[in-house]
């Protein structure tokens, strides 16, 4: 199910309002941050990820923008498809890579669907598959964790 691909897309556009600091809603680099099942949670997750990746870990803008896009896709998928009341976001930095996890209480597996030029939705896992170095799903006793990893240069 998980694919390895080093292709990169153009950076995502900047979001409008000021970013959310990790201390305001939690810090996904320290512990799982719980987000409500609402469309605006994708924006909160992007802002948290951007803050961790740039301010805390000092990673490149290109890596940050790709990672933020994928965080948004996983959180958006969980909001749309799981029926969960809350979702969990966790970020870890390991030697030479970062790992992002989105946990939800559904055991339904995400599907990587073929994408066509005129499709207006259904591109989330396609983007994850194209941009992440690795991704997958870990089934839990009560739900699942969908994750991806990106190579990160050491300082």
Image (cartoon, rainbow, N blue to C red):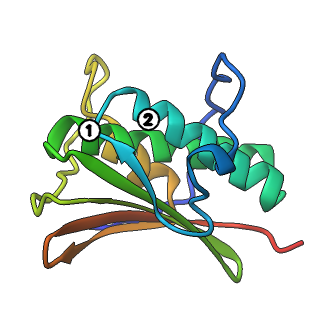
Crowd band around label 1 with a 10 angstrom C-alpha radius: few (<14), some (14–19), many (20+): many
Query: Residue 48's x, y, as percent?
Result: 61, 45
Q: Which residue is mark 1?
A: 79
Question: Is residue 69 placed above or below 141 in the rendered structure?
Answer: above
Determine whether, in the image, residue 9 is placed left or right of residue 52: left
Determine whether, in the image, residue 141 is placed left or right of residue 71: left
Query: Residue 92's x, y, as percent?
Result: 59, 71
- Closer to the camera, 148 or 88? 88
Q: Residue furthest bottom?
A: 95
Label drawn at residue 65: none
Q: Which residue is mark 2?
A: 42
Which is more N-terminal, label 1 or label 2?
2
- Closer to the camera, 75 or 10? 75
Please tell me whether mark 1 sits on a helix, a strand or a loop.
Answer: helix
Query: Residue 129's x, y, as percent?
Result: 39, 54
Determine whether, in the image, residue 23 is placed left or right of residue 144: right
Determine whether, in the image, residue 97 is placed left or right of residue 83: right
Q: Residue furthest left?
A: 108
Residue at the spot x=52%, y=36% of the render? 44
Residue at the spot x=11%, y=63% of the render? 107
- Closer to the camera, 5 or 13? 13
**The C terminus is located in which quarter?**
bottom right
Crowd band around label 2 with a 10 angstrom C-alpha radius: few (<14), some (14–19), many (20+): many
Tell me whether circle 2 and circle 1 mark residues in contact (CB < 8 Å): yes
Question: Is residue 152 placed above or below 35 in the rendered structure?
Answer: below
Residue at the spot x=19%, y=44% of the render? 113
Is residue 66 visible to us here? no
Question: Is residue 26 placed above or below 83 in the rendered structure?
Answer: below
């Amino acid at each position: 199910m998980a694919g390895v691909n080093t292709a990169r897309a153009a950076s995502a556009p900047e979001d409008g309002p000021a970013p959310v600091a990790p201390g305001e809603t939690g810090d996904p680099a320290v512990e799982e941050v719980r987000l409500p099942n609402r469309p605006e949670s994708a924006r909160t997750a992007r802002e948290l990820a951007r803050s961790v990746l740039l301010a805390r870990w000092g990673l490149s803008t290109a890596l940050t923008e790709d990672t933020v896009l994928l965080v948004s896709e996983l959180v958006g998928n969980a909001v749309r498809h799981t029926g969960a009341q809350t979702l969990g976001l966790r970020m870890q930095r390991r030697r030479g890579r970062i790992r992002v996890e989105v946990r939800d209480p559904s055991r339904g597996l995400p599907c990587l669907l073929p994408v066509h030029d005129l499709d207006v939705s259904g591109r989330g896992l396609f983007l994850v598959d194209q941009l992440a170095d690795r991704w997958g799903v870990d089934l839990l006793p009560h739900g699942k964790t969908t994750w991806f990893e990106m190579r990160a240069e050491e300082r």
